[in-house]
Image (cartoon, helix red, strand yellow):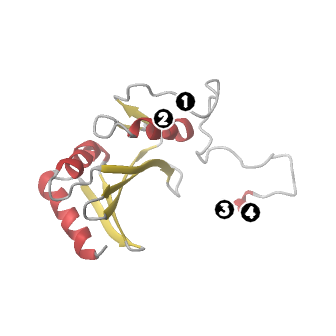
Amino acid sequence: MSQEILNKITEAIKHNVHGAVEHAEFSYDFPIITVNKDHIHQVLSFLKTDPELNFHFLTDLTGMQTEDEKHLGVIYHLHNMVKNQRVRIKTFFPMIHPEIPTATDIWLGANWMERETYDFFGIRFKGHPNLKRILNMDEMDIFPLRKEYPLEDQSREDKDDKMFGR
């Protein structure tokens, strides 16, 4: 992949979905585009259906929490198998309102990936056909991959969260 391909994808998105692109970079030989959460569904649909771009395969979808711990995000890895091109699409939103549109109407395979992301991060995918826990117990009232909870027993003096990157 090259910077030229990143520029091509970014310009195509900007031309077809105005105001969607927040940031674009080429990191570790991988094009990464950050998209406004209000336009994420349009961008994903465009990337899949545009005959030139043809990112028809959703390789992966997962959640993340930003370093400031105030925002959550979703990362989509898309693949154009015909041209063997990949792109990473990111979108972020406040932790107090963790909701974005589902991608299950674009890729059926997003179903389980969105359920897993909901299960671990608490990100709600609006319009998902069956958004419920998939790996954790239904009785859990926390989302284990959020950085909201101490990693160790707070009564222990021999452990420190700094040892775990906090």
Numbered mark located on residue 165 in the image: 3
Foreground: disc 4 or disc 2: 2
Query: Disc 2 residue type?
Result: Arg
Residue 82 in picture, x, y percent from top left: 25, 60
Q: CB under 8 Å between callouts 4 and 1? A: no
Q: Is residue 133 above or below residue 17?
A: above
Q: On the image, numbered disc 4 is attached to which residue?
A: 163
Q: On the image, numbered disc 2 is attached to which residue?
A: 115
Q: On the image, numbered disc 1 is attached to which residue?
A: 133
Q: CB under 8 Å between callouts 1 and 2? A: yes
Disc 4 residue crowd, few under 14, some 14–19, many 20+, Cα 10 Å:
few
Name the element at disc 3. loop
Rounded to the nearest whole Å, what is the CA distance between mark 4 and mark 2? 31 Å
Q: Quadrant of the C terminus?
A: bottom right
Query: Disc 1 residue type?
Result: Arg
Q: Nearer the viewer, residue 91 or 110?
A: 110
Q: Left of 128 or right of it: where is 46?
A: left
Mark 4 or mark 2: name the one nearer the start of the chain: 2
Mark 2 or mark 3: name the one nearer the start of the chain: 2
Residue 11 in picture, x, y percent from top left: 17, 64
Numbered mark located on residue 155 in the image: none
Mark 1 or mark 3: name the one nearer the start of the chain: 1
Q: Left of 18 or right of it: where is 162?
A: right
Q: CB under 8 Å between callouts 1 and 3? A: no
Q: Quadrant of the N terminus?
A: bottom left
Q: CB under 8 Å between callouts 3 and 4? A: no
Q: CB under 8 Å between callouts 4 and 2? A: no
Rounded to the nearest whole Å, what is the CA distance between mark 1 and mark 2? 6 Å
Query: Disc 4 residue type?
Result: Met
Name the element at disc 2. helix
